[in-house]
Image (spheres, coloured by chain):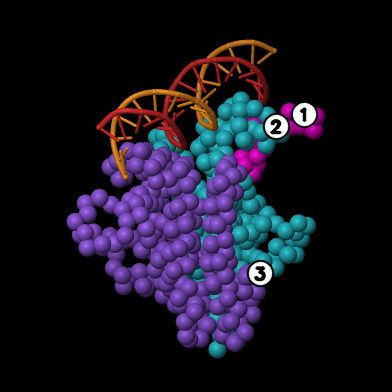
Chain colours: A purple, B cyan, C red, D orange
DNA sequence: GTCTATACTAGGATAGAC
DNA sequence: GTCTATCCTAGTATAGAC
């Protein structure tokens, strides 16, 4: 928006505001992942970028603001990854399986953002936010609900058509997303991690969640 | 240890050091749950207890120290809840089912501690801890591994006897515990929550994790 | 053992140069 | 737009009274 695309873009040496923000977001996500919210200072983030606070405070009002932006980015990735599949052709069970695998892949490939997002839930409760931030915070909660509802809807469909067992859909989604989100805790890319390996993990997650751990007797 | 049990205990009006610590731990767990680690100050915790910082700093060296103690307490609860079942009689599948339900119950009944414990993983990565704290931190990691291994062992048994599907046990435990730990995020005791209701949730968790979401065709 | 008072500083945030 | 310099509060931690 700040800078319309033009043939001269190729000559640009400075970043647009959007790009500048994105770069900060990456650095912040990385820092939050490694040190956690409390132990990460704005200077830490600046350090990752090789710049000073000034640049960050030009784009973000506060540390919380920065964190919220990272969190929001993660939610957008998630919604983006699964909503297309949810609305596509195919049986609910098959769509759900693809959604699980897609979500697992996003978690593994965009780990810093996803990890921040998982931490983020902690901050939803922190009362120490200003009135205007409360609005952003609320939008984040809404996004998370929307995201969760994408799953709830497909699960509901699946139950109706007999593909899925008759759990309460609202409930069933909790352990489902819980198992996925918890990946942010244990997953570490192995040195030279291949996409094949990641796909294997994603497949196993879907298999586990859909068919369970017990042998069908 | 500070104060041996004696007949005169009934007359005591002051708390033993152990009891004093426990009370602080409860208050701290509550505060960490409500505001998160970053937003919780030592004063916040003191406020919950209706005392001042002095009392807390008499028992705990630092805020991190206090947090570690809460975390440790949570891990002890967990190990305590499942290890007995793991070592009891019965088929692995049945023991695993009971372990899942027991763990779910602990999470619901001791939510503040469990929530702190779930947050805690974040801090394992924060490099900003002193050398002596690093030791405590390490013991916490070890405890978590021990705890996880209790599940791994039972799952391994279950696979060997054909009760469970042939996942890698180390892997299978991740979504299993992930789904359980994620309860700390969504579970809130409903007003007038009954134990029956909690047991229903625990049962559903076990059912979901062992039999999966898909209908057995 | 707990309180009051106080020291100390990390780090969030802002102003103004460039 | 980014940097340098500075302000300033919140909150950790300690010393010493009681």
Magenta span: B6-31
Q: Of the residues under marks 1 and 3, which one precedes in the sequence? A: 1
- Left of A129 or right of it: where is B133? left
What distance separates the C-alpha of mark 2 from that of mark 1?
Answer: 18 Å
Q: Of the residues under marks 2 and 1, which one precedes in the sequence? A: 1
Q: Quadrant of the N terminus of chain A?
A: bottom left
Residue A191, position in %: x, y? Answer: 28, 60
- Left of A20 or right of it: where is A149? right
Would you call the spot at circle 2 few (<14 residues within 10 Å), some (14-19), or many (20 or more)? few
Q: Which residue is tagged 3?
A: B203
State the SS at label 3: helix
Which residue is pictured at 57% across the width and 61% down the height?
A142
Q: Residue furthest left?
A: A11
Residue A148, position in %: x, y? Answer: 55, 67
Q: What chain does badge 1 belong to?
A: B
Contact (Cβ within 8 Å) of mark 1 with mark 3 = no
The reply to whether residue B173 is visible in this rendering is no
Residue B107 lies, with reference to residue B68, above or below; the image says below
Residue B8: say if magenta.
Answer: yes
Q: Quadrant of residue B179?
A: bottom right
Which residue is pictured at 41% across the width and 48% down the height?
A32
* Front tag of 2 and 3: 2
Residue B149, position in %: x, y? Answer: 48, 59
Q: Main secondary structure of the magenta part?
A: helix
What distance separates the C-alpha of mark 2 from that of mark 3?
Answer: 39 Å
Q: Of the residues under marks 2 and 3, which one precedes in the sequence? A: 2
Q: Which residue is tagged 1?
A: B13
Q: Which residue is tagged 2?
A: B50
Contact (Cβ within 8 Å) of mark 2 with mark 1 = no
State the SS at label 1: loop
Please determine if labels 2 and 3 lie on a single subunit: yes
């Amino acid at each position: 928006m700040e800078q319309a695309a033009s043939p001269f873009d190729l000559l640009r040496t400075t970043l647009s505001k959007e790009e500048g923000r994105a770069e900060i977001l990456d650095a912040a996500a990385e820092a939050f992942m490694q040190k956690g919210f409390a132990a990460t200072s704005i200077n830490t983030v600046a350090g990752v970028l090789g710049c000073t606070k000034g640049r960050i405070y030009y784009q973000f009002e506060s540390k919380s603001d920065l964190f919220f932006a990272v969190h929001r980015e993660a939610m957008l990735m998630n919604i983006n990854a699964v909503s297309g599949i949810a609305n596509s052709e195919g049986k609910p069970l098959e769509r759900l399986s693809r959604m699980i695998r897609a979500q697992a892949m996003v978690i593994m490939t965009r780990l810093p953002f996803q990890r921040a997002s998982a931490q983020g839930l902690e901050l939803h409760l922190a009362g120490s936010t200003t009135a205007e931030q409360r609005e952003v915070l609320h939008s984040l909660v809404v996004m998370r609900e929307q995201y969760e509802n994408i799953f709830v809807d497909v699960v509901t469909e699946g139950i109706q058509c007999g593909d899925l067992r008759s759990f309460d859909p609202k409930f069933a989604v909790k352990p489902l997303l819980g198992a996925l989100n918890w990946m942010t805790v244990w997953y570490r890319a192995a040195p030279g991690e291949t996409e094949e390996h990641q796909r294997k993990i994603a497949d196993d997650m879907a298999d586990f969640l859909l068919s369970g751990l017990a042998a069908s007797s």
